[in-house]
Amino acid sequence: MPEATDFGVVVHLDELLGDRGMTLTELSERVDVTVVNLSVLKNGRARAIRFSTLAALCDALECQPGDLLSYDA
Amino acid sequence: MEHGVKPTGIARFTNIVVNVALVLMVLGPILRAIVALAPDGTAMRVRVPSDAVSALPDNARLAPIVPVALEIEDPTAKQSLAVFLWGVPPFALGIVVLAFLRGIVGSVRRGDPFIADNVRRLRAIAFALIIGGPLVQILMQFFTSVVAESAGVRSAPFRLDIPGAPPVIGLGVLLLAQVFAHGVQLREDVEGTV
């Protein structure tokens, strides 16, 4: 189970990458976000995500925002 | 667009002081101009060289308190010590301020000024000026009186100028510290944004 951020938002990037057989580096090249920032997002250390980044991730992973993010109160 | 930044108590207090000081700074010259242009017998004071006071006109006299430089030949150890100590407070204040400023300059050179340490440094500089400024003046006047009285000369009565430049500047630095605190918060928000 991925770790929730400080705000209780859970990022399911690992699962999505695993399902699609994609590495973080490949995703980084597709969405033009650094591996470091994707790692921050994956490990629940991000404080905010831009809509542009979210849209690019959903496009690259062919998913909806709700597939990528969930909320764990 | 509001960014939801609440004004802190420090910012509100400084805002009041700055506005009051601004009003006084504007009113002061206006009132002085009115008094000067409508003379009513009130005495006015000007600084002149000491050798100009040998023959004063009828309508001019020396002010009750005239600061002069006192030369003491063969000073005693106590007098020498007092003169030395007279110069210590302003240097001490300057060293404190410069030490903290050095830390800030170092962070700016590293390209990383918006850090919590700089907020603390700026607040320390502010309090050093707000409290240290008047304290330096008190100490300097004390050591002046020690030297003067040891030479058998009655020293001038104590006078504290409020507000002096250091406390006002200190308030400005305190406000700057608050600006940096907001900068630190913004930086944390940006750094965590993907």
Image (spheres, rainbow, N blue to C red):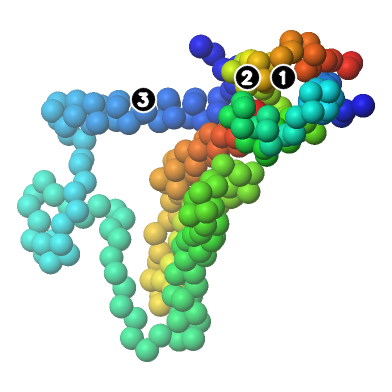
Q: How many marks?
A: 3
> SS of the residue at dot 2?
helix
Three-letter amino acid code at disc 3?
A: Val
Q: Which mark is residue B2?
A: none
> From this viewpoint, is residue B144 visible?
yes
Counting from the top left corner in percent of width and height, residue B157 is at: 43, 56
Q: Quadrant of residue A43?
A: top right
Q: Dot 2: within a 10 Å radius of its alpha carbon, few (fewer than 14), some, or many (20 or more) residues?
A: some
The residue at which mark 1 appears reads as A61
Comparing labels 1 and 2, the label whose residue is closer to the camera? 1
> From this viewpoint, is residue B188 visible?
no
Comparing labels 3 and 2, the label whose residue is closer to the camera? 2
Compared across the picture, whether A40 is left or right of B69 comes to right
Q: Kindly check if marks 3 and 2 are in contact, taking CB atoms under 8 A apart as contact.
A: no
Counting from the top left corner in percent of width and height, residue B68 is at: 28, 65
Q: CA distance from mark 1 to mark 2?
A: 8 Å
